[in-house]
Image (cartoon, rainbow, N blue to C red):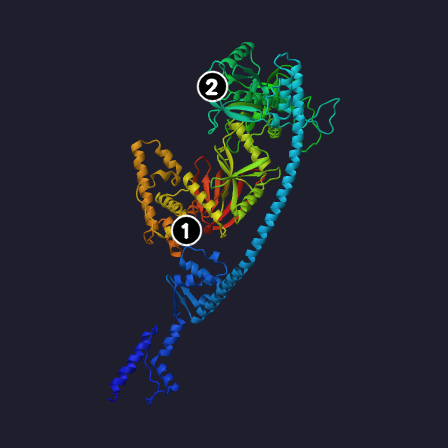
Amino acid sequence: LKKKTVSKTFSESLNSLMEKLRATEHHYIRCLKPNQTLKPGDWDNEFMFKQLAYSGTLEVTQIRKAGLNVRRPLKHFYQYYKVCADDPAALRAGTVTKRAELLLKQLSVDESKYRVGKTLLFLQNYEIIDQLDKVRELRIMEYVINLQSFFRMLRDYRRYRIIYRAVLRMQGFCKSWEIRRAYNEVRGTAKLFQRYARTYLAHQKMLDWKDVDDPELTPAKKREILLKILHPKKHGAARIGLSGRRRPMRLQPARVMGDDADDVEYAEMPKFAVSHEGWLHTKIGKWNRSEKLYISLKQGTLTIFEDHESLTPVLSYNLAVCSLKSEDSKLVLTRTEKLYKHKVRSVREIGRRIKGPLWGTDCVVLEAEGAPDVLPKWAERLEESIAEAKLVDAYKMQVNLDGQDEDGPVNQKVAQVIKEGYMRKKKPGNSKIQDLKRTWERRYFVLYNDGKLKYYDSRAKRDEKGSLDLRFFSLQEIDEDVEVDEEEEGEEKQALKVQNQFFRIMKGKQFALNSGKHVFFLASPEREVCDEWIQTLQTTLAILYQKSPIFSQEFLRVCMMDGTFMTMPMTETTKCRDVIRHLCKKHALNNETEWGLLEIWDHPGLPGGLSERKLPNEELLLDQTTLAWEQAARKRYGLVSLVPMNAFKLVLRKVTSLLPQARTKKEQHLEFCQALADLREGRFTVPDKTEIYELAALAIFKDLHEGMSDEEQEEELLLEEGQLTAQLHHYLPNHWFKALEMKRGALQKQQLSDWDALIVHSFNELTRSELVESESMSQVRRIVQAFRMETELNSVAATRMFIERVRLAPLCFSAQFVAEMWSVDKILKVLLVINYGGLHIYRLGPNPLLLSTFDFNTLVSWQSMNDSARQESIVVCCSLL
């Protein structure tokens, strides 16, 4: 054997050293001599320390230690240690950097011992990592213990389910036995009733035979018929054929305790119970042509509509002033009095009596085709409803103007006077020329507690000039502009001088009673008198609406943003807060303070020219909201039995999203439906239309992935142009398509094709391409980029991104209030909008104009004051940077 040389030994030692270096992750290499004797196993600590000190290795180590030498990839650190967080829901942020900072704050790591970079996390030492690993082990151990307890519980839970099912079976058997016993009792009682009824029918049949002299009715034949009546199962059923007719229904007022039968008659207020609807061939006027129209009978009112969807009224009758006559295969309904009765000259009255039934609107002829039992059923319903309407119309209400409820009965024989006095009246003409001919007339008005407002020539009340049935009218105050020139500042007000006496000119006041297209103006030169009449009529109308309410007084219907609705009972004490709490509990919505109840009208009839309003939490739904709907319905539609379903509705919407609460699946679905509705209805406004296409692409991605399995979602989805043309109206604003209807067919197809191409391009870029951050990126792309760094793109992520972008728009996910903005020289009524993006001020009108926007970061102070003199408004003072 050859002796090892020095070079051979050095080579082996060097190879061993290189193997050790390759097995480690080294950052710095320094060779040191363990001793000066060159002997193995001899380690000189003092000599080694001197080498480390003189070579600067200790100083490098100290500097490295002070310079946060422990480094970890930011994304890996967050994914690995986020299980240690006490509140994972509070780690929501747009980027991984912010989420890592929130995680370190929750873990109580000293801020001086770490720095968060763009892609790396810098720590001072490994002790922090050790502490985090210990916390992570404890958390994982807790999860493991929970899993173990769950699996140990499964065996006992299975036994519990078996016993529970057995108990349910036993309960079901006992309940079915009780039901069977009750059924047998009811069946035995029913058989007894049937026996007596058959005996009564047989007796009536024998009485009919006494008046009939028929030689074919032999005693054997009579016996056979009677046996069939008494025992139909044994001897076979027989047609009874009695000659008796049904007695007409007679409605009598229900008497209450304390009635005085000698002097006066008292009764409870009757309620309408008859309702019917359907299609009939109708002639308005006997000489006019027949049309197939939709007819509705409800609350003592017969209304003829063009169709059952739009519910556009053609003609309405108050059945209390109508008479019904049945002719050959048709019904003739004649109106004897109009909604507004006014005494005219005898010649004109004769002309109206001739014109009204023949070619006017005072007569309706109902005809039916097909089923022979249609008209008899309508005749029966109309007769019953006419009797009901007359009884309700003549009922006298209890009207208390002092605000105190009186439980005493009301005299139903004599109508009591609520208020009377002189006023001016004016009925506008059918044209501008007729309107110029009409003048103000002074009449003596008398208001009775049966709902009639009558007027006479004088206080004597001898000659009645006309009357109105107030339960079909609504009151509206008229704000008139002052036509007198204003004096300059510093001058005295001018006065009227007559025969050396001075008089001051005072402006009067007027108001209107509206019922659809019918308007009746009342005025008084004394504003105090007019104010008293307005207050009295408002109180009286609120009570009279109870006779024939258009909207339900017992149930409330609330629409949800996903297209469904809920019906819940309503009482006099039901408040908006109670409904919101019930709906949030029903649909498992976490924070009820974020949701609000909005009333939406199909016309701008709310204060400020708005069509929607957020209801205050303390508002009474029956005495305030429903009463306002009754007034608005009578003003817009007049005398009708039904109004369109979307004319007045309550909608549950999310009015704020400032609180970082965890959301359930149902809540997130409602938020997405609300965001999509805001996009389609035009609430979402943005200067760049590209964001609308990108939002439409996210909504399409969400809808496409909802019904897919996990394996199908892993596959890449690529759209091509032309696939979405038929579904564009589900994802783009509605006013785009309304504007498109005015264009030619070729231009419409080209525009739809362009929209389809833009949405497909945005879809493929957002879901497949890598998004590069730049200053010109849209808000949607920034949100998508932040989400894609945190999680994979799926239907849930697309829903969250869609909601996140839409809620930043001023009019989306917001609470709106009518407010007053004060300036130096005037007060301007504005629309105040508060949402996630800040405070936005709009000018009131059908199309609100954005005046200014304030971010919450710029608001120094916020103070609100309730103005008791101005209802429906909020006065807000803001101090801005």
Residue 845: x and y in percent read 46, 35
Q: Is residue 25 visible?
A: yes
Q: Nearer the viewer, residue 107 or 670?
A: 670
316 relative to 39 in the view: left or right = right
Is the Cβ of the residue at disc 2 closer than 8 Å to that at disc 1? Answer: no
475 relative to 32 in the view: left or right = right
Position of 164 relative to 868 (above/below): below
623 relative to 308 in the view: left or right = right
Mark drawn on residue 99: none
Image quadrant occupied by the N terminus: bottom left
Q: Mark 2 vs mark 1: which is more N-terminal?
A: 2
Q: Residue at x 35, y 34 (%)?
A: 740
Give the labeled residue for mark 2. 431
Helix, strand or loop under label 1: helix
Residue 834: x and y in percent read 48, 45
Residue 365: x and y in percent read 51, 17
Q: Quadrant of residue 274 in the image?
A: top right
Helix, strand or loop under label 2: loop
Residue kind at label 2, given as amino acid type = Ser
Q: Nearer the viewer, residue 95 or 388?
A: 388
Of all residues, the one furthest to the front in this rendering is 220
How crowded pointer 2 is (Cα within 10 Å; few <14, some 14-19, many 20+) is rated as few
Q: Residue at x 57, y 15 (%)?
A: 343
Give the labeled residue for mark 1. 797
Residue kind at label 1, given as amino acid type = Ala
Residue 366: x and y in percent read 51, 19
How crowded pointer 1 is (Cα within 10 Å; few <14, some 14-19, many 20+) is rated as some
Of all residues, the one furthest to the top in this rendering is 347
C-alpha span from label 2 to label 1: 61 Å
Position of 204 relative to 594 (above/below): above
Q: Is residue 825 visible?
A: no
